[in-house]
Each structure stands twice: as structure tokens, then as C-alpha cells.
Image (tube, rainbow, N blue to C red):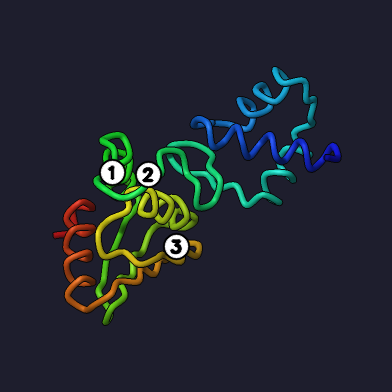
């Protein structure tokens, strides 16, 4: 495995193991494993891997720290989801089987990541832009229920 491939594989593994709050922390973890990397190279590697930043720290797309299979979300994941919604969600609208969530600029990815991590019932999938998230649900009733839950957490009624 080449240097870049090995380094990126190691970065992905580290991000799957534990929350990493900063690039400096990730750089230190790599150095402890014998991999010296510049900040610019680390940033490029993270961009290439699609690493996402959330309030909980950096995470691999679809493999956020704390992702679980089925069942209720662990308390920490649920608490982080609720905190993120309260902090960033500005508007929630049901539109057919979709729920449209508006956030401040640059906040949609963080909210979407936490929404994916918490694995709410009836959420089929999410697509996030800069300040808007589309949440697919299986029915209009599910969309209305999800809208009510997210709006309630956001203090929007």
C-alpha cells in the first residue's frame, strides 16, 4: 500500500475508532503511529475521504462515531442529536413525504450527520446542502410526525 493510501486508510480507521475533535488531534494520533503529515496534506486527505465535521468531531461519511445497528440510539447519540437540532435548526416543514429542514449557513451537514447517527424511525435517508436538508420518509403521516418531533426539539412548536 502506497504512502497516501496507507495514510488515508489509517485516518479512516482512527475516525472510526473514536471521536476526533480537531485536525491537530488527528495529526498527533497519526504521528504516534509513525506517520508524519503536514496540515495541508492532512486537509487534502480528509477532503479526499469525504470526512465530515459535526459538533461531536470529525467522522467518516455514513460511519459517524456512535453509529449503531437497529434499536434505540445510545444516550450520547440521542443527546448530541437533540443539542445539534436546538443549536442549528431554524425551520422544519413537511412537504409530501419529505421533511425540509432549514439551518444557518454551513450547518446542514452537521444536522444531517446527527440525524443519520440517531437513526429515527421512518427516516429513509437524508440529503444535505449548505443550509437545507431533505429528509425522505415512507409516507406523508411519517413526514408530519418527524416534522413535529424535530420542530419540538428545535423549540419551534
Image location of residue 37, percent across then percent down: 79, 30
Callout 2: SS: loop
* Left or right placement of residue 43 versus residue 142 in this view: right
Image location of residue 81, percent across then percent down: 31, 45
Whichever of labels 3 and 2 marks the residue nearer the N terminus, that label is 2
Q: In this orientation, which residue lies closer to the viewer: 16 or 155?
A: 16
Of marks 3 and 1, the one in the foreground: 1
* Label of residue 35 in the image: none
Image location of residue 155, percent across then percent down: 18, 53
Residue located 67% across and 21% down the image = 28
The residues bearing labels 1 and 2 have C-alpha atoms spaced at a distance of: 7 Å
Which quadrant holds the C terminus? bottom left
* Label of residue 131 in the image: 3
The residues bearing labels 3 and 1 have C-alpha atoms spaced at a distance of: 25 Å
Q: Which residue is mark 1?
A: 73
Badge 3 vs badge 2, beta-carbon distance below 8 Å: no
Residue located 35% across and 51% down the image = 88
Callout 3: SS: loop
Up/down of 55 relative to 29, above or below: below
* Label of residue 68 in the image: 2
Whichever of labels 3 and 1 marks the residue nearer the N terminus, that label is 1
Give the class, few, some or many, for how many residues have Cα within 10 Å of label 3's Cα (few <14, many ≥20): some
Badge 1 vs badge 2, beta-carbon distance below 8 Å: yes
Callout 1: SS: loop
Residue located 44% across and 58% down the image = 108
Whichever of labels 1 and 2 marks the residue nearer the N terminus, that label is 2
Give the class, few, some or many, for how many residues have Cα within 10 Å of label 2's Cα (few <14, many ≥20): some
Q: In this orientation, which residue lies closer to the viewer: 30 or 93?
A: 30
The residues bearing labels 3 and 2 have C-alpha atoms spaced at a distance of: 26 Å
Badge 3 vs badge 1, beta-carbon distance below 8 Å: no
Image location of residue 9, percent across then percent down: 70, 39
Amino acid at each position: 500500500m502506497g504512502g497516501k493510501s496507507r495514510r488515508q486508510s489509517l485516518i479512516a480507521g482512527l475516525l472510526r475508532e473514536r471521536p476526533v475533535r480537531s485536525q491537530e488531534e488527528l495529526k498527533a494520533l497519526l504521528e504516534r503511529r509513525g506517520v508524519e503529515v503536514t496540515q495541508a496534506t492532512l486537509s487534502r486527505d480528509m477532503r479526499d475521504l469525504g470526512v465530515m465535521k459535526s459538533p461531536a468531531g470529525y467522522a467518516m461519511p455514513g460511519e459517524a462515531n456512535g453509529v449503531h445497528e437497529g434499536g434505540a440510539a445510545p444516550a450520547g447519540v440521542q443527546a448530541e442529536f437533540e443539542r445539534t437540532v436546538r443549536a442549528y435548526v431554524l425551520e422544519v416543514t413537511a412537504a409530501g413525504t419529505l421533511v425540509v429542514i432549514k439551518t444557518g449557513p454551513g450547518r446542514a451537514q452537521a444536522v444531517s450527520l446527527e440525524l443519520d447517527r440517531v437513526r429515527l424511525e421512518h427516516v429513509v435517508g437524508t440529503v444535505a446542502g449548505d443550509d437545507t436538508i431533505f429528509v425522505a420518509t415512507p409516507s406523508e403521516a411519517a413526514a408530519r410526525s418527524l416534522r413535529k418531533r424535530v420542530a419540538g426539539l428545535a423549540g419551534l412548536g
